[in-house]
Amino acid sequence: MKTNDPIDVASHCARAALGMMERHKVPPTPENFSIWYAFVGGRNPELTAAIDAVLSGTRKFTQKINDELYERFAVFSQDKAELREVGLRVEEAVGRVLEFLSNASQGTTGYGTALEAFSGRLSGGPAPDYLTEAVGAIMAETKAMADINQHLVRSLELSSTEIARLRNELDDLKREASTDALTQLANRKMFDHALKLGIHQAGLDGTPVCLLMIDIDHFKQFNDTYGHPLGDQILKLVARTLTELVQIKDTAARYGGEEFAVILPGVNLEAAMAVAETIRGQVADKRVTNRRTGQVLGQVTLSAGAAIYVPGESVGAFIHRADEALYLAKHDGRNRVRSETDLVTAAKKPEKA
């Protein structure tokens, strides 16, 4: 978290932050200090609310809470430094446009004043010397106004081009910061951010949020047998299927390697299972072919696990439960969907001798 505080303000905030950290037994690590410095400076209302909620309750600042505060309010925002820089450049370009418009306005005012003087002189009589002087003055003002307008047009054209270029650059940076390059799905960092937002919203309005963890069956075997280019082709196939089937409010992400995740806000567990089953079925109906030779290489199948968020649990516990359901689907034979309720049923089954 970068700041531009004067040294006296920074020193005061630093001492206050360290004092509060000591009182609440928060280890003075650089990560923790950055959060408490921002809290003391009142820079982020959401951060202030989050820390005040802990201070006003019975909870203590455990390592888990400290880590969650840092991940929520520092890590993701640091990746946006380039975006902020581009934003400043856009502001500068807009500022230049406003300056050009101001200059044009001043030129128009001068032109209007000259016209008024011209009118007044004409009303004073038809004397040639007055008329010649007035005409000369207005011609000079007309030329000056034309020059200003030509400069304005050129400047506006250049600024318009610059703003368009910066806007495209900003869009590209946003996309790169949140997108997996191969599959064009949300990347892991964007997934973490979206999941926290979904959980936060669920806490505000009580709506459910479900999570699907999805893994490609026997992916290593495909890679080892046919090579990484085919493996990439399979990853893209699964990604396209996810993109086609999830709604705009949902988040489909590449979680890592051959594992994917889908965040489903406002969806109960039964509906989440239906979404997972549709995804599994759509992929299973496809056949992988070698684009170069046309040879059919086989079927791609998915295993999936589904879980619903339990109010108050950690993000890690939520993900772990969905992962456990995924592992159960693998254990039960792959190419199937299991949920956290199946984990309970599986736990009750007696072990086979």
Image (tube, helix red, strand yellow):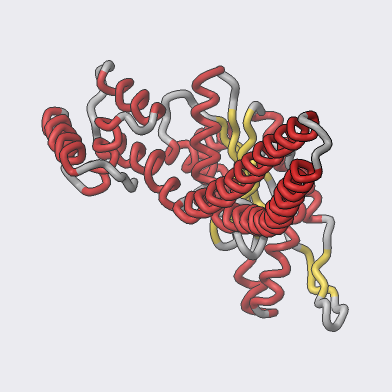
Res 217 quadrant in image: bottom right
- Looking at the picture, does residue 227 appear above or below residue 151? below
> Residue shown at 30%/38% (left/top)?
64
Left or right: residue 15 versus residue 224 is left
* 284, 353: nearer the viewer: 284
Q: Position of residue 260 (x, y in %)?
A: 61, 52
> Residue shown at 31%/27% (left/top)?
51
**Residue 280 is at least partly visible in this image:** no
Left or right: residue 93 versus residue 14 is right
* 302, 70: nearer the viewer: 70
The residue at the far right in this view is 294
Res 117 quadrant in image: top right
Q: Position of residue 352 (x, y in %)?
A: 52, 47
- Looking at the picture, does residue 254 appear above or below residue 36? below
* 321, 332: nearer the viewer: 321
> Residue shown at 58%/51% (left/top)?
93
> Residue shown at 60%/33% (left/top)?
210
Q: Position of residue 157 (x, y in %)?
A: 72, 56
* 143, 167: nearer the viewer: 143
**Residue 324 is at least partly visible in this image:** yes
For the image shown, how many numbered marks are present on the structure?
0
The residue at the far bottom in this view is 293
Q: Position of residue 201 (x, y in %)?
A: 54, 26
Left or right: residue 126 versus residue 320 is right
- Looking at the picture, does residue 299 appear above or below residue 352? below
